[in-house]
Amino acid sequence: MSRASAGDRAWAQRARRARTLRAERPHAEPLLSFYLSLLELQAPLCDPTDATRWLQAVRAPDTSDLPRLQLERLPLDELSPRFGAFCQGIPETAPEPIVRAARTVSAAGRETRTDLLLALLTGSDFQTPAGTLGCDPAPLAFLPRGFLSPLAEALSDLVTLSGSARTPTCPQCGWPPQVSMLDDEPDALGTRRLVCALCATAWVFPRSVCPACGTSGDEGLQFHVHDALPHVRVESCRTCRRYLKSVDLRVLGLAMPLVDDLATVELDLWAAEQGLEKIAPNVLGL
Ligand SMILES: [Zn+2]
Ligand SMILES: [Zn+2]
């Protein structure tokens, strides 16, 4: 099996799951339709040939260093025209603030686009570039994230994940977790994995520990389940008031955590009503 077929299959599986959820959950239809158009733009970016070429530049010098990838060392200036094309490809059916930001960024200079890619990878604030370009920070940050995420995923696929890393952020790229997942494994029932918000790596993390602040026990996680969604629950922390969703693959093996997270907006709305803040908003900003 080649790397390309593994990557292509992951993209096809996400699209299939998004189409299933769109049919089952009509209220999530606009969101999932936009996500499907995003997947079409992202799939060709996940190129294993490019990733192999860039790996040398971004791999951490020592195999014990975490995160394993230093993505801010990607050739961002070389990527800038491709990022421009990605922005141009954002369809008119996207949410209006994203369409506006995409048109602005594709018309901007190469250097502006390079700066936006670097801002995302260094965790910089988008307020200043948003002010300069005359758009909102959230849709502006969506663009480099949507563009860089498939590249990060392709690079992550090339680096062996250290089995012992039980870090609260992604051992491959350093981003926070998007979603949590539970599954039975031959040697460990109910193993919890966190799934990275940028590179989609899944890594093992203790079940009872809050990934945002490290608290466990009575002061740590509590769980909220919605009757209509038995396979997705909200894991929120009593101490830091952050949350993420957990997708239980033992209840629904067909679920795909990153996609099911997008399709269950009602849980995010419920969490916002409780005054909870998501550890990492998903790619659509929810
Ligand atoms: Zn990652
Ligand atoms: Zn916490």
Image (cartoon, rainbow, N blue to C red):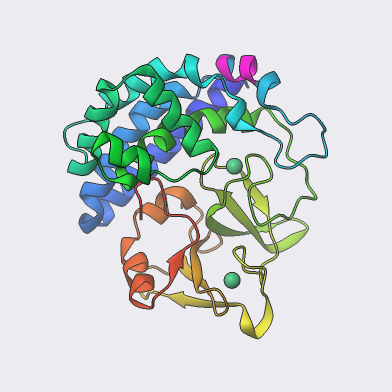
Q: Nearer the viewer, residue 109 or 179?
A: 109
Give the residues in magenta: 50-54
> Taking the image as four quarters, which one is ligand 1 found in?
top right
**Relative side of 74 to 67, left or right:** left
Residue 133's spot in the image, x, y percent?
27, 34
State the image coordinates of residue 62 (x, y, percent, origin top left). Answer: 82, 32
Q: Nearer the viewer, residue 125 or 199?
A: 125
Question: Where 203 sits versus 86, above or below?
Answer: below
Q: Is residue 95 something that shows in the picture?
A: no
- Tell me where residue 249 appears, x and y as whole percent: 54, 58
Which residue is located at x 52 percent, y 44 percent?
123
Q: Position of residue 59 (x, y in %)?
A: 71, 28
Prevalent SS, magenta region: helix
Residue at image location 38% in from the left, 74% down from the top: 226
As drawn, is 6 to the left or to the right of 135?
right
Figure quadrant of the N terminus? top right
Q: Compare residues 43 and 251 and report the one nearer the observer.
A: 43
Q: The C terminus is located in which quarter?
A: bottom left
Residue appearing at x 33%, y 19% in the figure: 109
Q: Is residue 136 left or right of residue 248?
A: left
Q: Is residue 127 left or right of residue 201?
A: left
Can residue 238 be found in the magenta stretch?
no
Q: Up-down: is 225 above or below 2? A: below
